[in-house]
Each structure stands twice: as structure tokens, then as C-alpha cells.
Amino acid sequence: MNGRVAQVNISPGGVPKAAVAEARVGRLGLHGDAHHHDHVHGGPHRAVALLGLEAIERVRADGHAIAPGAVGENLTTAGIELSLLPVGTRLAVGDSVLLELSSPAGPCDVIKDVFVGGKSGRISILLHPSDSRMYARVLAEGVVRPGDRITVLPPAPDSEAAVHAELDLLDSVERDAWLTLWGAAATAGLDVRILDRGELAAAASPGLPGSIFNRAFGMRQIPIALPEVERLYRDAGVAGWVVAGADEPPWDGAVGEELTGVYATAIDDVLARATPLPAGVTIRAVDPDDARSVATWVEIFITAFAIEGPLAEAWRRFGPILARSKGEHWLLAALDGHDVAAAATFTRRRVAWLGGGAVLPEARGRGIQRALIAERARQCADAGNRKITATADVDTVSARNLEALGMRRIWTRALYRVDPARPTMPA
């Protein structure tokens, strides 16, 4: 399938984007183009937005005031049904530009005025699979012009497009889990300052040093938000840590402090490898309204992870609030009648995210951690979840436990320290 560029569109922000005679395409998009919603659009994985004339004509036929550039696409194409192509498909544009389709572009409020009744869902891929805008990465830079030929190519053998598409879902669930944790601490009266802006989620806490309450997510998708994260930590007067790809440091010269694997699979894959509970082990769900069980869970968690000082006291304060939060599910494991392990799960969008799980030192080496993984998978499957994800430091017992139950590492990330005392970092 081949086509052509019908129109090249840019704007300083907002819609419509105006037609131009040519534009240079760089790693982060078209030069001269910008967005009002930098926490949603832009970044290396959403560098270029595309929409086909064929889709525009179908939408216009339904009575909507759509035209090339009206919904913010950078390249209006002709001759290609873009949103029917699989993620990873490459588009050779003109003499030099090579794009890779990365994901559908969801409708948003910025474009609602184009649609009758503000119903921008008319170009949602979930409702109208052939009429969605598509995002693309830039594999090769260059200049694009109206009339340039577009050649459709299959995904490259080493393409990571499908991985990043999966990460978009998994990251959204993990972000919600961290926001729930931080929100519980703030509700308990702790000084936790939270940013929640689209793909960006970050927290800073002057009284709780360390990375748990001083962490930022979203740099994989929107590295342009880095200065905003830096301001958060500078204003709070604390060091923070940015989560980003191990091979994609968020700024030049950044060095990751630890490597963490992101694991994921279908829940059925975990259940297929689950084994009976070890001898003497029982597992039960924690009733969030049972203060004694919640307190037991918190104390085991604190002890097993060797949490000390202000952070331990913080857990005791916000633990009961977190236990009652939507999406939170806690388990306790007992060995010969004595509680020895605690584990948490957060569920959202039919995905189960395995949060912290820890076993007291005297009960380790008995398969309890794997039993907790399997039990969480069972309960989440019964509740209708279909995918399971978790993180673990690379080359650790936790990582091996996940792998033993069929979970595969799909990405490796690192924590990058943001020091408020250092000069402003380049975006």
C-alpha cells in the first residue's frame, strides 16, 4: 500500500494546525510545531500525528466540521487507511523521513469544537477503528512536503513498537497505583506534594527522604515535562528520582542508580505455572475494615523491607487509609499459624499490578513469595482481570520468582537522581 502527503500542518499550540509548504521532522516532531497539552502529546513516542483524508471525508459526511489540520494532525495523508495498520508499521515519506506507527491518538477536549455536540469520540479507534489519528516515532529525520510519496513497510524485525504500546497500558495502571499511595499519605496529613497531569505523575515530600515519596513517572512518554519535575523537587528542597528507560536517560549525561525490570504476561500464564501452597502455609485476604489485620500487614511490611524512622511511622499513619483505597487488595501469609508475609495488588483497567510483597527473614526460602504471586493472580483473575504486571530489581530473588511463574521482562528502566542544588538540566 502506498500513498502521499496531502498536507503538512503545524501550529504554536492548539487547533487547527495550519498548512505549510514544508517542515523538518526531528526526533521529537515537526520543527515549529507545539502543543497546549504537553502532558498528553509530544515526546519521542508521539512525535508525529497522522490522519488520512479518507477518514476525514467519512467524518465530514456525518456532519462534523472536520478538515485537514482541524484535529491537530501533522501529516494529512491520502491513499492509506492509517488506523487499520498494525503498530510498528513503517512509513517511508519522501526522500529521507522514516516513521513508525506507535499508537492510536485518543480524542481530547482540544478538538471537541470540530464535532457536533462536542463528540470527539467520532475519531476514537475504539468506536470507529478506521477513522482514528495515529501517532508515530521518527526513525529517520528529514524534510516533508505536500505531494511526497508514502511507502508502507512492514515492522522492522527489531521493532519495539509493540512493547511501548503495551507499556502505555501498564504504565497507566502503575501510575494510578503510586498516585493512590501518595494520596493516602497526603490524606493522613503528611507533607506529600503531588503532580498528576496526564502522563506525568510525581511526588515530593520534604519529611520523607528516599525515592518512594520523591519519584516521577512519565519521562518515557513526555520528556518535555522534565523541567516541571525539577521545579517540584527544587521547591520542596529535596532530591527526587525520575523513572526512565535504562537505555533512554532523561537528560544528557544522566546515570541510572538502579535497574528495574518491568514484567508482564497474561494472568492465565501465571496460573498455569502455579503450584500447591507450601506445607504449613495459608494465605488470606485482609479486610480493610479490620484494624488489627491492617496493622499486622503494615508491621510485617515495615519489618520485612527494613523500613525505619520517619518512613516507618508514615506507613503506620497512612496504611489504614491505603488499605481502603479503591483498587487496593492486601494479602497476609501465615506459616504454621503465624503471620510471616504481606503482599499488595492494585487493579485497574483489567490489569493487576503486583505491588510490594515481602516475607519476614525467618520464613524465607520456603516458596511463600511465589505462593503470594500465584494467589494474587487467582484472585485477580476471578475479579475479571486479564493481564498481570510487576516490577523487580534486575537479577534478584524477586525477579527470579516472577520469571518462575511465567512473567517475562519486557522493559528495563532506571532511577535517575534529580538534585535541586545542581544547575537546571537541559530538557
Image (cartoon, rainbow, N blue to C red):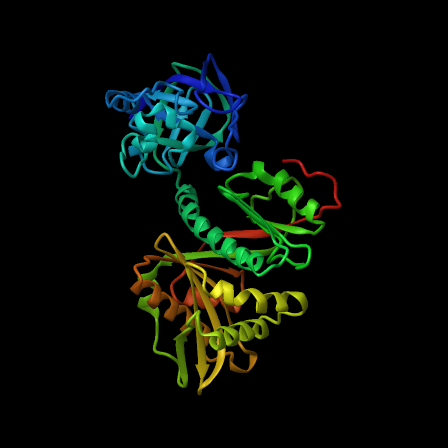
How many numbered discs, if any?
Answer: 0
- The percent position of residue 345, horizontal first and vertical second, equals 43, 63
- The percent position of residue 105, horizontal first and vertical second, equals 39, 34
- Quarter of the image where the C terminus is located: top right
Quarter of image, res 307: bottom right
Compare residues 150 and 337 and report the one nearer the observer.
337
Quarter of image, res 191: bottom right
Q: Is residue 7 visible?
A: yes
| Residue found at the far top of this picture | 21
The residue lying at 43 percent from left, 29 percent from top is 110
Q: Is residue 222 left or right of residue 310?
A: left
Q: Is residue 62 left or right of residue 12?
A: left
The residue lying at 47 percent from left, 69 percent from top is 343
Q: Is residue 127 left or right of residue 409?
A: left
The residue lying at 62 percent from left, 72 percent from top is 306
The residue lying at 27 percent from left, 24 percent from top is 59
- Quarter of the image where the N terminus is located: top left
- The percent position of residue 252, horizontal first and vertical second, equals 65, 39
- Above or below 404: residue 120: above
Q: Is residue 169 left or right of residue 261?
A: left
Compare residues 121 and 243 and report the one nearer the observer.
121
